[in-house]
Image (cartoon, helix red, strand yellow):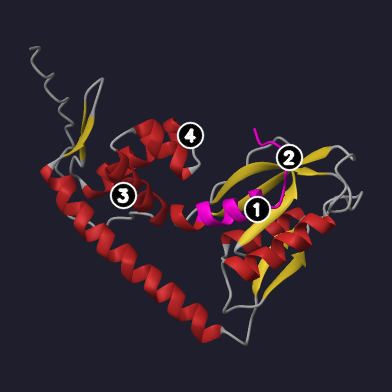
């Protein structure tokens, strides 16, 4: 039986204690990687590239001044410091999500949840966006009103980064979204809903990068359920 490879030692230099800038998206990425123990699967689940995930973990280890993971060519695992950090981060994220839900509940009746939309000049996507708004209301946010807000591209990105919009929809232009946003493209039929012979268009769905992977998966599932066009 072949002996296991020794884990690569990750040396993080000791530094005087300073308040760490951990970043919510980095914390969520660490939890996801700790659950998957595989960079490729974790990156896919987070809807980011594998190099971007690796960079997030390296920055996180530098901020906490401790090795959180060991790596070999074939495996990834948590160090003792990583296991301790995971317990604390999970508890902190749980409190944050409970606080977010409580805040949304307190705001109910004063401000609806917003689906930010950058219209196309042809207007071909209007029926899909309206259907998506209704589906979000019925399937995910039953206790909240959901409305479509038509924005310019800059207003759209600002609303998502600031958390004023839960999801964004815009025509795909091939350019990546700026820092602070996650995104995925979806193929939708062109023209009014129910017309299957009008071709198809690609739309960019965007969200704040601090949104939880579970919430992102739910948003994408609702959007993908509205189109019979094969994705990919």
Circle 3 SS class: helix
Which residues are the magenta region? Answer: 216-232
Above or below 51: residue 31: below
Q: Nearer the viewer, mark 2 or mark 4?
A: 2
- Is residue 223 inside the magenta stretch? yes
Q: Nearer the viewer, mark 4 or mark 1?
A: 1
- Image x and y of residue 154, in percent: 72, 55
Q: Which residue is mark 2?
A: 229
Pick the quarter of the image with the C terminus. top right
Q: Which mark is first along the chain, 3 or 2?
A: 3
Q: Residue at x 18, y 31 (%)?
A: 10
Q: Which residue is mark 3?
A: 31
Q: Nearer the viewer, mark 3 or mark 1?
A: 1
Q: CA distance from mark 4 to mark 3?
A: 16 Å
Residue 16 in view here: no
Q: Which residue is mark 1?
A: 223
In front here: 66 or 81? 81
Pick the quarter of the image with the N terminus. top left
Please identify the quarter of the rendering in which residue 189 is found. Answer: top right
Q: Is residue 195 left or right of residue 217?
A: right
Q: Which residue is mark 4?
A: 49
Q: Residue at x 20, y 45 (%)?
A: 65
Q: CA distance from mark 2 to mark 3?
A: 33 Å
Residue 90 in view here: yes
Whether residues under marks 4 and 1 lie with C-beta atoms below 8 angstroms apart, the answer is no
């Amino acid at each position: 039986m072949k002996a296991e490879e020794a884990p690569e030692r990750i040396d993080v230099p000791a530094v005087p204690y300073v308040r760490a800038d951990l970043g919510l998206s980095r914390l969520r990425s660490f939890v996801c990687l700790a659950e998957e123990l595989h960079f490729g699967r974790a990156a896919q689940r987070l809807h980011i590239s594998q190099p971007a995930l690796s960079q997030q973990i390296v920055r996180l280890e530098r901020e906490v001044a401790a090795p959180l993971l060991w790596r070999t060519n074939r495996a990834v695992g948590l160090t003792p410091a990583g296991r301790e950090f995971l317990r604390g981060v999970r508890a902190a994220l749980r409190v944050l999500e409970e606080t977010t839900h409580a805040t949304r509940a307190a705001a109910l009746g004063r401000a609806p949840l917003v689906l930010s939309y950058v219209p196309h000049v042809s207007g071909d996507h209007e029926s899909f966006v309206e259907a998506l708004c209704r589906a979000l209301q019925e399937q995910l946010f039953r206790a909240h009103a959901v409305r479509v807000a038509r924005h310019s591209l800059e207003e759209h990105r600002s609303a998502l980064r600031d958390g004023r919009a839960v999801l964004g929809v815009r025509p795909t232009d091939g350019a990546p979204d700026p820092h602070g946003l996650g995104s995925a493209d979806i193929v939708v039929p062109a023209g009014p809903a129910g017309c299957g012979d009008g071709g198809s268009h690609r739309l960019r769905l965007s969200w704040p990068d601090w949104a939880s992977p579970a919430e992102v998966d739910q948003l994408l599932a609702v959007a993908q359920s509205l189109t019979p066009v094969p994705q990919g």
